[in-house]
Amino acid sequence: MQISSFYGRLIIKHNIDVTAYPALEMMPAIKDNVCQRCFNTLDQQWQLPNGIRYCGLCLKFGRITTADTLVTIPEPNMFPSFSNWQWGGVLTRSQQRVVNEIKKHTHNHLVWAVTGAGKTEILFPIIAQALISNQRICIAAPRIDVILELVPRITVVFPTIPIAVLYGQNKEPYRYTQLVICTTHQLLHFRAAFDLLIIDEVDSFPFAGNQLLKNAPQTALKLTGRLIVMTATPTRKHLMTFKQRSYLPARFHGYPLPKIETKVVNKWRILIKNRQLPICLKSYFEQNNQGYQCLVFVPTIHDVTTVTAAIHQQFPDVKLEGVFAQDPERMNKVQLMRNREIQYLVTTTILERGVTLPDIDVIILGADHHNFNSRTLIQIAGRVGRKTSRPTGMVLAIMSTPSWQVLVAQMTIKWLNYQATKGDKDDL
């Protein structure tokens, strides 16, 4: 194992010759009944037959016990000098304001930017400044889809900077790099590694409210490190926690967020069970002569199967797939959608964010289901109108009964659009 593999990295000392790495720092894997990887207290039932105790919360990342030792080498920031990055774009006035607000201090910072505001573009000068300062940077997000969309965009702008891309299904071996892009779960493998940690979609499952990951950001950061979080739908806790905040209420192209149109169909599940479609849904398929792609969101995994079957029954020639979080073909199916090899994708809320598709429409079937809260609905609506090629589009919520959460989402979008009109006129 190369010595750089230990830099800022937390590794279980299994079959490691510590004499070969004099700089190694060692610590008990479990101290005072607290796991030193995820910093959760051990449950009484987490015990092996021989009496040795282990952490059951972070078990899937490799079992650590009271008999284990964790090793690391403090982050040395051993990187070549950086002076140039390649981006031909221009930030809007509001985007530049946010960049300036982030740069003028070194504290933690929240960026509240509506869907389609250009969050990634805002990151470019922030990342460049950190690279020039010889800092180590991590961009993390809760969902793999967000990571896979970020990587090519960052790579194009910083082509000379090696990037380690880390997520559960990635089989490539770990390598030491100045820039890391990973899922938030991967932060558990780092200890005081990063000078700058950026978490995109910070309010998203499976990061938000996850006891396992509660301490991961601060553990992965150096004591002098900085945390920047970004989201279109911050929680009250986020707004209270981050004293330094930036607000970006307008989309980069100046068009408003799409409104959510509603239709009440109280027996849509019975129709779907009988391989039929609600009239409004059937009409969309019949009238979509322009060939727009469409994401059809459904509440549950079971609904993915039944709705996909019903659409196939009524429109056997359409190019259609269904996808959910545990689907082994999930990434391939999303890529088919990106490549325009399919026109329709039936999905759970797993694609509520992180996937940017041009010329897209959205239908939310069962929008009154408890899996669709107002923040989720805002994110789903935000899939539409992301590109200048088609800055508008349709968002249709089909529900059994009128929904308070749908109404809150509609009112919030109306308020955000009003706030955007009060912003910098040069952006419009």
Image (tube, rainbow, N blue to C red):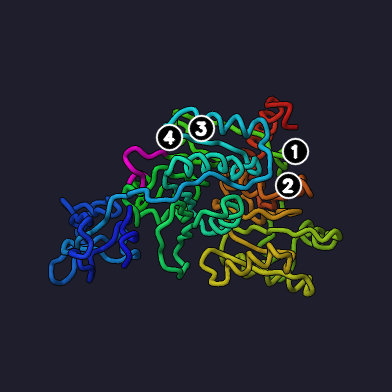
Mark 4 to mark 2 CA distance (whole Å): 31 Å
What's the amino acid at mark 3?
Answer: Ile
Question: Residues under labels 1 and 2: Cα distance?
Answer: 8 Å
The x, y position of residue 82, in whole percent, is 50, 46
What is the number of the mark on residue 385?
Answer: 2
Q: Is residue 248 visible?
A: yes
- Residue type at the position of mark 4: Asn
The reply to whether callout 1 and callout 2 are in contact (CB within 8 Å) is yes
Question: What residue does disc 1 label?
Answer: 255
**Quick check: 381 above or below 42?**
above
Q: Earlier in the sequence, mark 1 or mark 4?
A: 4
Q: Which residue does the image show at 73% across and 26% down from the upper left?
A: 425
Q: What residue is pinned by disc 4? A: 108
Q: CA distance from mark 3 to mark 1?
A: 25 Å
Q: Earlier in the sequence, mark 4 or mark 2?
A: 4
Q: Which residues are magenta?
A: 218-226
At x 18% / y 69%, what residue is drawn? 48
Q: CA distance from mark 1 to mark 4?
A: 30 Å
